[in-house]
Image (cartoon, helix red, strand yellow):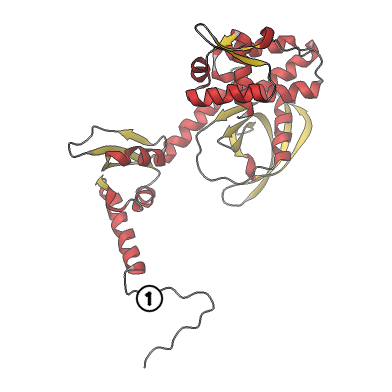
Amino acid sequence: MRADRLVAALLVLQQRGRVTAAQLATELEVSLATARRDLEAMASAGIPVYPQPGRGGGWALVGGARTDLSGLTADEAEALFLLIGPAAGVSEEAKAALRKLVQALPHTFRTHARAAASATLVDPTRWGESERTPPEVLETLRRAVIRSRRVDLDYRNARGEVTSRRVDPWGVVDKDETWYLLAGTPRGQRTFRVERVLSAELTDESFERPDDLTLQTAWAEVVREVEARRSRTWTTVLVESRFAAILAHQFGRHVRRMEDADDGRSCLRLGAPTALDLARHLAGWGALVRVLDPPEVRDHLARIGAELVAEYAEGSPAPARPGTPQPAGRG
């Protein structure tokens, strides 16, 4: 099970005392089967949680176990709350438990623990393929967020251009294993893909986050802007109802279900940056999808189809492999 979900489950158990698998599934927004597997995995791993069968039963911590944090070092407290922070966002009860855990820390650790708990946000919806994020860079950025220290970045943008800049790191976001840094700059809020950070170095300069800033609201604004750019063009299509869910999953957030047709087909509205992007996504569906509008998408599909026929139609010459000598033409 994911570590953040494990911590979230423990927080819920500690706050409530006893929960059923169904209640835990609702709290963590997972399936009932996943919640049961998680509880069983916790018990198998030696965590003092056990099932109580029968009416009024459920899962509980042995002896109403509680967490004693007084023996943690400063670094251990930071590491713990970096993990707990995103997990505590699943419910109000988990948030309440997090506040109690902070109060259980030695007073001198609490400021950094609170900063660690709010340093990371988890967004499960992927935007696209990503490279591997250097772990040492991510760790440096997290430390900078927790300690409110400015950081010097060498950053490669989408065009491959490398620039150096000093930023105020506000928080990091895990978007389905692609990491982003939200930061303040002289030109306002900026978002950086952590995988494009070539180097990150803490400075001796401190900064203060805007009083009204929360990582959740700042990231929500980024998502709104990006999603608006990613769905500037929309098309209406018909697809057999049994394939509608698959097609909808392919387009993620950029899909709207319309009223179904009477012939067993579903009507969907699909979004992408351009008509060509829509055509490229739909070309592999062939005749299973019928595009109703706009005409630009149909035109692109017709051109793509003609190119494929010319390239792969029966009797067309196979492309030569690199280094293969070509036969001489007849003169």
In the picture, measured across the screen, residue 287 lies left or right of residue 81, that is left
- Give the x, y percent position of residue 114: 69, 17
**Quarter where residue 174 is shown:** top right
Q: Nearer the viewer, residue 324 or 2?
A: 2
Structural crowding at the residue carrying mark 1, measured as other residues with C-alpha within 10 Å and reported as few (<14), some (14–19) or many (≥20): few
Q: Is residue 217 above or below residue 12?
A: below
Residue at coordinates 72% horizontally, 23% vertically from top-left? Answer: 80
Residue at coordinates 36% horizontally, 51% vertically from top-left? Answer: 276
- Give the x, y percent position of residue 219: 54, 28
**Quarter where residue 245 is shown:** top left
Q: Which residue is identified by label 1?
A: 317
Q: Quadrant of the N terminus?
A: top right
Residue at coordinates 27% horizontally, 33% vertically from top-left? Answer: 258
Residue at coordinates 73% horizontally, 31% vertically from top-left? Answer: 150
In the picture, measured across the screen, residue 326 lies left or right of residue 58, that is left
In the picture, measured across the screen, residue 141 lies left or right of residue 299, that is right
Q: Residue furthest bottom?
A: 331
In the picture, measured across the screen, residue 310 lies left or right of residue 217, that is left
Q: Quadrant of the C terminus?
A: bottom left
Q: Is residue 35 above or below residue 240?
A: above
Whether residue 151 is visible here, answered yes or no, is yes
Q: Is residue 106 above or below residue 39?
A: above
**Quarter where residue 227 is shown:** top left
Identify the amino acid type marked 1.
Answer: Pro
Q: Is residue 228 above or below residue 37?
A: below
